[in-house]
Each structure stands twice: as structure tokens, then as C-alpha cells.
Image: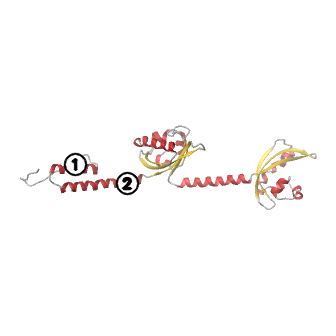
């Protein structure tokens, strides 16, 4: 062992001189270095590379990447090996895996659709780079279908009345580099039903300020929209009643009053036609 290796592992020169490489390796990883002995006995010339967990003198686990080649020393086969401490890299990789697992759990358990589109092409034609599986419950299309067919979003599921507005809002988001909130209807592939979604879109620029990706979170707001439309309809009906009351208050011209009431009823209750029949005592003159 050279001085740098001894400092890493915490052994004195005397201790290091009496140790074999297997003595430094974690017990669970010793099977990875045992083939070196058999290769040495066979005289295998091929260089080898492997990664193991090594134990320092204090029992700390360090990750080490070894590379070695077989040579001859004092008439016997011997390995010349170089070890690189990759503990920090391994810890970073493990932290990354843990974050990815956390993100996966979050994405699998939220109701919202999480999506991302790389802007290699026109934003309405670029394929999705990520689409959470919740998209299938709203659109009937799987994430894999979105990855393979960029036309699904704008041509197959967006309501025709929302399409031009949606394209305009998307391009404005990219040009201004400002987030936008979009609301539009998406059609389910199997049922043909439309769902209202609220979509928060964020542009992602590169280091030169050019937007290279847009990503967002979309949630189904159909129930909210239905409730909102019901309130608006109820308000129209109340206004119709008020208009009718006002018309009756100024009951001077029967025909004009009837027209006002019919007009209000048609607008409020979304009817095609309304008529009023008036019953008066015989001999009464109606103006």
C-alpha cells in the first residue's frame, strides 16, 4: 500500500505490509475479489476493474473503484492495483436514487397530471418527455401513447372551441417566459366525454434565456365548472324573475309586458320559445 492508500484506510505501514486486499474488503463484497486469486493462478493477462466496499481500520465503509493488471513479482504472479475513493460519488448516486423514488411515490399518489414537453419542434407538435400515469384516467391515453404520438394533445383530445386559444396561450408563455394558467376541455378516448382541466404551465429556459422546455401540473376541474355553470344559470333565472316583476310593475301595455317576460324566460331558462296566454273576463278590453 502506498502512503495515500494507508491514510485512507487508517493502517500503519507495518499493518499494511501484512495484509491482503481481501482483508480490506467488506465481507459481503469479498466474493468480488476472490476471482483475482484464481485468475492469478491461471496467469490471466486481462486487466480487471471492479468496485467494492472497503473497511477502514475504524470500521468505516468506503466505496473504492479498483483497476488492476497481472504481473510477475519475485518469480510469482502478482496484481498491481490502483484504487480510487468513490465514496462521495456513491453517496450522491444514492441520494439521487432516494429523491427519484420520492418523486415517483409523489407522482403515483397525486391526482394531478404532471407533464413536460421538450421544445425541439413547434410546441404543439413536440413530443412529451414526461407524462404521469394520471393522464389515462382523464383522456384514456397512456403516457406511452403521448410519448410516441405528439398529435394526441392538440388534435385528438382538445375541444375544437378551445384549440386556438390554447395554442395562443402556450406560445405567449414561451415568448414572454412567464407562467400561464390555462383552462380547457379534454376528450376521453373511449367515452367521448369532455373534462375541464386547469393547467399551470411553467417555461424552463436554458443558460442563454431560450425556453427549451415547458412543464406543468393539470387537474380535473369538471365538478367545479359544472357547479359554476349551475350558479350562473341560477343567477340568470333570478334576473329573469326580477325582470318579469319589473315588467308587471309597469303593467301599462299588455303586449310589451308579455314580450319582456318571454324574453327574460328564453334567456334565463335556455328555451327556444315562450308564450303567454291571457284570460280576461268577457267584455274586458285589452290594450
Q: Extreme left residue here?
A: 283
Tell me the SS state at disc 1. Answer: loop
Tell me the SS state at disc 2. Answer: helix
Residue picked out by circle 1: 274
Q: CA distance from mark 2 to mark 1?
A: 26 Å
Q: Extreme bottom residue here?
A: 58
Image coordinates of residue 271 in percent, x first then y, are 26, 48
Quarter of the figure with residue 249:
bottom left
Q: Extreme right residue here?
A: 74
Image coordinates of residue 135 in percent, x first then y, are 50, 48
Image coordinates of residue 161 in percent, x first then y, are 39, 42
**In the image, is residue 24 above or below residue 190?**
below
Few, some or many residues within 10 Å of mark 1 (<14, 14–19, 20+): few
Q: Nearer the viewer, mark 2 or mark 1?
A: 2
Q: Residue at x 83, y 48 (%)?
A: 81
Instruction: Say left or right for 61 vs 286.
Output: right
Residue 260: numbered disc: none
Q: Residue at x 14, y 53 (%)?
A: 252
Q: How is the image coloured?
A: secondary structure
Number of on-image labels: 2
**In the image, is residue 87 above or below residue 143?**
below
Residue picked out by circle 2: 228
Q: Residue at x 31, y 55 (%)?
A: 235
Work out whether residue 1 can be spotted: no
Going from N to C along the chain, the mark reached first, 2 or 1, is 2
Few, some or many residues within 10 Å of mark 2 (<14, 14–19, 20+): few
Image coordinates of residue 250 in percent, x first then y, are 17, 55
Instruction: Say left or right for 137 vs 261.
Output: right
Amino acid at each position: 500500500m502506498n502512503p495515500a492508500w494507508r491514510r485512507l484506510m487508517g493502517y500503519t505501514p507495518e499493518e499494511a505490509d501484512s495484509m491482503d486486499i481481501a482483508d480490506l474488503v467488506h465481507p459481503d463484497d469479498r466474493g468480488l475479489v476472490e476471482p483475482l486469486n484464481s485468475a492469478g493462478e491461471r496467469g490471466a493477462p486481462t486487466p480487471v476493474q471492479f468496485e467494492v466496499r472497503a473497511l477502514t481500520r475504524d470500521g468505516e465503509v468506503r466505496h473504492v473503484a479498483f483497476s488492476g493488471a497481472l504481473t510477475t513479482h519475485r518469480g510469482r504472479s502478482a496484481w498491481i492495483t490502483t484504487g480510487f475513493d468513490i465514496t462521495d460519488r456513491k453517496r450522491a448516486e444514492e441520494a439521487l436514487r432516494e429523491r427519484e423514488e420520492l418523486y415517483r411515490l409523489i407522482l403515483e399518489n397525486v391526482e394531478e397530471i404532471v407533464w413536460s414537453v421538450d421544445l425541439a419542434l413547434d410546441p404543439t407538435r413536440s413530443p412529451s418527455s414526461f407524462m404521469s400515469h394520471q393522464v389515462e384516467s382523464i383522456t384514456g391515453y397512456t403516457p406511452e401513447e403521448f410519448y410516441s404520438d405528439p398529435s394526441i394533445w392538440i388534435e385528438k383530445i382538445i375541444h375544437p372551441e378551445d384549440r386556438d386559444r390554447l395554442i395562443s396561450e402556450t406560445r405567449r408563455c414561451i415568448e414572454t417566459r412567464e407562467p400561464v394558467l390555462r383552462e380547457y376541455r379534454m376528450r376521453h378516448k373511449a367515452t367521448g366525454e369532455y373534462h375541464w382541466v386547469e393547467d399551470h404551465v411553467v417555461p424552463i429556459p436554458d443558460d442563454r434565456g431560450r425556453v427549451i422546455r415547458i412543464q406543468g401540473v393539470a387537474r380535473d376541474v369538471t365538478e367545479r365548472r359544472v357547479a359554476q355553470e349551475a350558479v350562473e344559470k341560477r343567477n340568470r333565472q333570478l334576473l329573469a324573475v326580477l325582470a318579469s316583476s319589473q315588467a308587471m310593475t309597469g303593467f301599462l301595455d299588455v303586449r310589451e309586458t308579455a314580450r319582456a317576460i318571454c324574453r327574460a324566460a328564453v334567456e334565463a331558462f335556455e328555451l327556444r320559445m315562450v308564450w303567454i296566454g291571457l284570460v280576461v273576463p268577457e267584455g274586458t278590453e285589452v290594450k
